[in-house]
Image (cartoon, coloured by chain):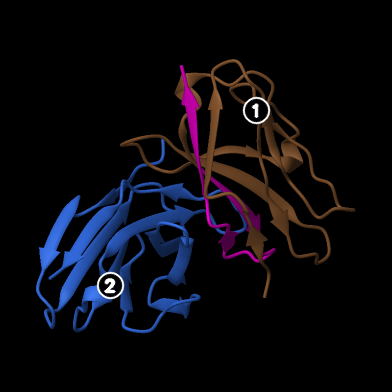
Amino acid sequence: AQRVTQPEKLLSVFKGAPVELKCNYSYSGSPELFWYVQYSRQRLQLLLRHISRESIKGFTADLNKGETSFHLKKPFAQEEDSAMYYCARWEGTSYGKLTFGQGTILTVHP
Amino acid sequence: DVKVTQSSRYLVKRTGEKVFLECVQDMDHENMFWYRQDPGLGLRLIYFSYDVKMKEKGDIPEGYSVSREKKERFSLILESASTNQTSMYLCASSLWGRNEQFFGPGTRLTVL
């Protein structure tokens, strides 16, 4: 079974500091990976996907096949980045089934 | 804009009760999903459906069943609720062949 691992349940940084949320996946073929975010009292939503190589809200994530990682990074964290973040992997079916990691709660202190 | 709605935001039930959680999406999506969200365990897939009357077990189907009689509606059923089913339940949908899922607001179920 495919696995997605987020080793940190909680991550705290101060405003303006760099932040990195870790995600590792079990190797299998050509993975397609995503980061989803859930802000307080809001629904879970897509933040970014590796295939589009875009930067959303200052966040980037690079797929490292050698290390089987897809870490989410932002050079200068903002208080509004405080949220729950999930890494997810598409299983490659037309059902659109995703495997999610355990999630990391990011808190950015003023 | 995709809209996924869930019938209740909060629900309190007693052990042994039959519980229905409803999810409706308005974008003609073929795929629909039910997850439970627990701290430290992330999102775990309970069941999914890729067409009317079609259903597939996810990772944790025990104690749950589902129903999809119409394309826009996907119901999660707890036949006999137990305290270990206290959780946040999230519904999601996606287009066939696409992997972006759109989520509902969630239902926080407490079983006493």
Percent x, y for residue A17?
A: 63, 20
Figure check: B62 above or below A11 = below
Q: CA distance from mark 1 to mark 2?
A: 35 Å
Q: Image point 38% across, 84% down: which residue?
A: B62
Q: Which residue is mark 2?
A: B85
State the hue of chain A.
brown
Choose top left, top right, bottom left or bottom right for residue A43. top left
Label drawn at residue A59: 1
Q: How many marks?
A: 2
Q: Which residues lie in the magenta part?
A: A85-110
Q: Quadrant of the N terminus of chain A?
A: bottom right
In magenta segment, residue B19: no
Instruction: Between residue A97 and residue B2, name the one nearer to us.
Output: A97
Position of B58 with respect to B81 (left or right) is right
> Which image quadrant is residue A39 in?
top left
Q: Quadrant of residue A31?
A: bottom right
Please tell me whether mark 1 sits on a helix, a strand or a loop: loop
Q: Residue A59 appears at what percent x and percent y?
A: 65, 28
The type of residue carrying mark 2 is Gln
**Numbered disc 2: what chain?**
B
Q: Can marks 1 and 2 be said to lie on one chain?
A: no
Residue type (three-letter) at the residue carrying disc 1: Phe
Residue A108 painted magenta? yes
The tint chain B carries is blue
Could you tell whether B80 is left or right of A12 in the image? Answer: left
From this view, report whether residue B42 is shown above or below residue A42.
below
Residue under the point 45% across and 22% down = A80
Tell which subunit mark 1 falls on: A
